[in-house]
Amino acid sequence: MTTLIVWHDGACPLCAREIAVMRRLDRCGAIRFIDAAAEDTVCPIDRAALLARFHACEDGAMLSGAAAFAAMWRAIPVLRPLGLAARTPWVLRLLERGYQAFLRIRPRLQRLARTRWPA
């Protein structure tokens, strides 16, 4: 079985909570989660770019945004149908638009999350 590599922003409270959920759902250990915010992390691309968008490496291909989420979903049995649906171009485009909208409001959501879920 190929291990999917997922880079996430461990300093982001939203990302940390989401990755915690994904870790619990990944009962087969199919995903290697890497905190790109950690100073000792070796990044395959520019760290700022890695932290600006969600990234994953599936079968040697670097993916970002909705495509990276879809790869993660495909690796988790309960989410696999959603990940497979994202292989359809129009579904992936729709998910990417939603992800881009999320990125625009992410800073505000992070501030809100930091007040609600202090470290």
Image: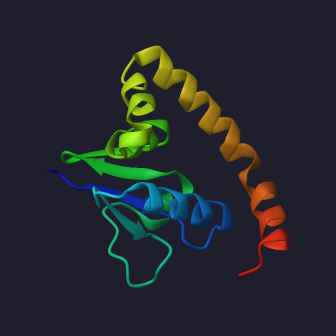
Q: Give the percent coordinates (x, y) of residue 33.
A: 38, 65
Indicate the colouring scheme. rainbow
Q: Which residue: 41% across, 61% down?
A: 7
Relative to 86, 112 lies left or right: right
Q: Which residue: 40% across, 29% down?
A: 81
Q: Nearer the viewer, residue 55 or 45?
A: 55
Q: Nearer the viewer, residue 51 or 56?
A: 56
Where, by quadrant of the figure, is residue 78 drawn?
top left
Q: Give the percent coordinates (x, y) of residue 70.
A: 42, 37
Q: Give the percent coordinates (x, y) of residue 51.
A: 52, 61
Relative to 113, 90 lies left or right: left
Q: Give the percent coordinates (x, y) of residue 44.
A: 30, 63
Q: Which residue: 61% across, 63% down?
A: 17
Q: Residue furthest left?
A: 1
The count of marks equals: 0
Q: Is residue 117 above or below residue 57?
A: below
Q: Is residue 112 above or below residue 75?
A: below
Where, by quadrant of the figure, is residue 99 drawn?
top right
Relative to 13, 96 lies left or right: left
* Quadrant position of the C terminus in the picture: bottom right
Q: Is residue 110 above or below residue 78?
A: below
